[in-house]
Image (cartoon, helix red, strand yellow):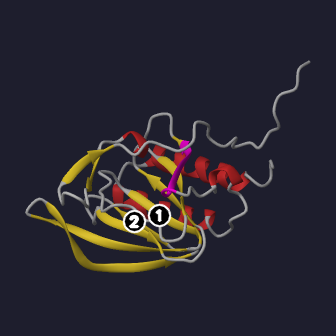
Amino acid sequence: MANRIAPLRIFVRDFTELVDDTSDEATLLAKGRGLLAELISGDDWLPDEYATARADRYAQYLLHCDPLERFSMVSFVWGPGQRTPVHNHTVWGLVGVLRGSEQSEGYELRDGLPVAGADRQVMIRGEVDAVSPTIGDWHRVTNSSDDVSISIHVYGGNVGTLRRRKLDETSGQLVDFVSGYDNAAMPNLWGLPAATPC
């Protein structure tokens, strides 16, 4: 396990060094894109408990959060056909597909409500995309594969605690939400076994 988890540990170290060096969004997205692409070039580093789909909705597992909440890292696990509501992020973000494929539909605000734009893309394994309030922050994501799809997301804050907005499909109105996480414990970045008593 120690060697298997090493890519995640290296990514966390390198991304921490990146946010230590700069807070410039364009630089973070450009350099962070390369780091995330390297991480998702292999898919055997993600522990099984953070790669498990839920039957009722997509799962969101916290993999790491910087102690100063400058960035967080999350695995999103999607069953076939599962999707998000139309939502925003309020911070910059990077999304890399680890397994499967996902369709992202871009939205833009008009008269205070998100309206579908022309931006629609299917991302496949190994591809990385970016979101932020400055380059486009509203979208809906759907698992476009016939199997479980997993994407790794990196956000410029502790995304599970941020108050964000989503489109309520019943009322057609924007509502506040805080996503939270589906796990109570994060991965052991060193892959060490459980302690044994002396």
Which amino acid type corresponds to the residue marked 1 in the rendered image?
Val
Disc 2 marks a residue whose amino acid type is: Ala
Task: Classify mark 1: residues with Cα within 10 Å, few (<14), some (14-19) or many (20+).
Answer: many
Q: Which of the 4 quarters of the picture holds residue 45?
A: bottom right
Is disc 1 placed on a helix, strand or loop? strand
Say whether residue 24 is left or right of residue 55. Answer: left
Q: For the point 56% across and 44% down, which residue is it?
A: 64
Q: Number of callouts in the render?
A: 2
- Residue 1 in percent (x, y) is at 81, 49
Who is closer to the viewer here, 152 or 168?
Answer: 168
Towards the viewer: 17 or 117:
117
Q: Is residue 29 above or below residue 190?
A: below
Residue, far left:
111
Whether residue 161 is visible here, answered yes or no, is yes
**Residue 130, label in figure:** 2
Mark 1 and 2 residues: CB-CB less than 8 Å, in contact? yes
Viewer-closest of 10 and 96: 96
- What separation in Å lies between label 1 and label 2 (alpha carbons)? 6 Å
Q: Is residue 112 covered in magenta?
A: no
As rendered, which of 39 and 13 lies closer to the eye? 39
Residue segment shown in magenta: 56-64
The answer to which of marks 1 and 2 sits earlier in the sequence is 1
Residue 183, image quadrant: top right
Q: Residue 67: x and y, percent?
A: 50, 34
Residue 142 located left or right of residue 145 = left
What mark, if any, has residue 95 been given in the picture?
1
Q: Which quadrant of the structure image shows residue 150?
A: bottom right
Q: Is residue 47 visible?
A: no
**Residue drawn at (35%, 66%), measured in percent from left and top?**
140
Q: Position of residue 153 (x, y in %)?
A: 49, 57
